[in-house]
Image (tube, helix red, strand yellow):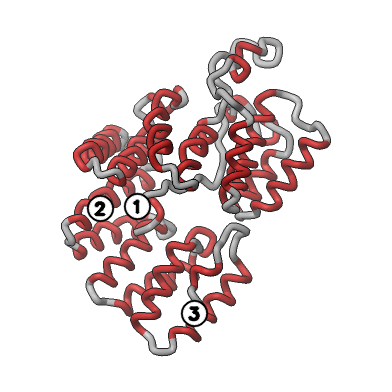
């Protein structure tokens, strides 16, 4: 299955900050932040490292939350480039995330009338994901189970972000074998979504519900029903790469390699920015190997295309040429 169904949680591709809603633009929040966000969207992780280094050397970061925001992007870039030890050193430099030094009220002149932690929730998420990348699964699980207490205020309400958060914890529960807990979380997602039917946009959350249902079918090896759930997701959002990838795998399990290959190839052609990740490419190459005698030539063509468009963190060895 796709990254969301693996034992290692995926790192985010962008960083969120609790102050974002208080400013008119990203650049109002921190120096050149819009540029950092754009680089992250394009997977230009080495450029992010250069930009963070430059900002630090030129003393462009003048407020405490500036340092935390840039540190978040730096840690994210290091993790995307698989420099996990360097990312750990970066995160360890903060020592205690909950110290008074990271509270708004400790700087009343800089943050009048604002209280609470200025540590971005995404930074705490990276802190939880990192042990998985360094083969310390138990520490990662311990950190994940602490995350709910640090959710921003707007997530604690019955909002779109809460629904997504509960869904992520459900995936984690499933990964560690807590099927009962995962089912409870998935049911909670559907209940919350039902209560938010009047929201202006429920596509992402509706897809989350369908993907949850598909996982239940997959456990029972009911691939036809799982395909049906994934197709509903794709009809709503053709860029839902989790649904696209998992639909293709279900077709492979149903011995329909030709259609499985078409699903992944079409996704790479339509939405390369989101579809081009190692999981999708590994699965596509596996299908090539099963379907074609001349699979080496086909994979080489794919590899040449990847070399032209892939982000910095892409592992080209996944084509197995």
Left of 131 or right of it: where is 289?
left
Q: Earlier in the sequence, mark 3 or mark 1?
A: 1
Using the rendered view, name the quadrant where residue 169 is placed. Answer: top left
Q: Is residue 25 above or below residue 154?
A: below
Give coordinates of residue 304: x percent, y percent. 59, 77
Q: Where's the N terminus, which quadrant?
A: bottom left
Residue carrying label 3: 299
Q: Earlier in the sequence, mark 1 or mark 2?
A: 1
Left of 284 or right of it: where is 38?
right
SS for dot 1: helix
Viewer-closest of 180 and 242: 180
How far is mark 3 from mark 1, CA to CA? Answer: 25 Å
SS for dot 3: helix
Residue carrying label 2: 215
Q: Which residue corresponds to the image point at 59% horizontal and 26% vertical from the top-left?
A: 95
How far is mark 1 from mark 2, CA to CA? Answer: 9 Å
Viewer-closest of 239 and 2: 2
Q: Earlier in the sequence, mark 2 or mark 3?
A: 2
Give coordinates of residue 295: x percent, y percent. 44, 84
Q: Nearer the viewer, mark 2 or mark 3?
A: 3
Q: Which mark is residue 282?
A: none
Residue carrying label 1: 5
SS for dot 2: helix
Q: Which residue corresponds to the image point at 47% horizontal and 41% vertical from the top-left?
A: 131
Left of 29 or right of it: where is 266?
left
Contact between marks 1 and 2 (CB within 8 A): the answer is yes
Which residue is at the far right?
A: 58
> Few, some or many C-alpha atoms within 10 Å of disc 1 (few <14, some 14-19, many ≥20)?
some
């Amino acid at each position: 299955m796709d990254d969301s169904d693996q034992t290692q949680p995926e790192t985010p591709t962008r960083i969120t900050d609790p102050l974002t809603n208080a400013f008119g633009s990203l650049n109002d929040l921190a120096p050149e932040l819009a540029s950092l966000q754009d680089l992250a969207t394009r997977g230009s992780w080495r450029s992010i490292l250069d930009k963070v280094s430059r900002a630090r050397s030129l003393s462009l970061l003048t407020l405490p939350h500036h340092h935390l925001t840039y540190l978040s992007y730096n840690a994210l870039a290091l993790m995307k480039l698989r420099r996990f030890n360097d990312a750990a050193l970066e995160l360890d430099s903060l020592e205690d995330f909950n110290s008074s030094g990271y509270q708004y009220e400790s700087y009343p002149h800089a943050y009048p009338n604002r209280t609470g932690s200025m540590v971005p929730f995404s930074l705490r998420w990276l802190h939880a994901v990192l042990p998985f990348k360094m083969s310390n699964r138990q520490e990662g699980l311990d950190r994940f189970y602490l995350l709910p207490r640090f959710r921003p205020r707007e997530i604690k309400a019955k909002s779109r972000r809460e629904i997504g958060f509960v869904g992520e914890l459900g995936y984690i529960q499933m990964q560690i074998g807590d099927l009962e807990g995962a089912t409870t979380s998935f049911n909670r997602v559907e209940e919350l979504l039902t209560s938010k039917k009047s929201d202006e946009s429920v596509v992402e959350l509706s897809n989350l519900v369908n993907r949850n249902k598909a996982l239940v079918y997959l456990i029972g090896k009911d691939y036809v029903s799982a395909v049906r759930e994934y197709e509903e997701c794709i009809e709503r959002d053709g860029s839902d790469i989790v649904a696209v990838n998992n639909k293709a795998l279900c077709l492979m399990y149903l011995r329909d390699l030709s259609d499985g290959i078409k699903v992944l190839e079409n996704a790479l052609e339509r939405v390369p920015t989101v579809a081009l990740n190692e999981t999708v490419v590994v699965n596509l190459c596996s299908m090539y190997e099963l379907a074609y005698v001349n699979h080496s030539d086909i994979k080489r063509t794919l590899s040449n295309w990847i070399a032209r468009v892939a982000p910095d963190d892409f592992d080209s060895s996944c084509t197995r040429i």
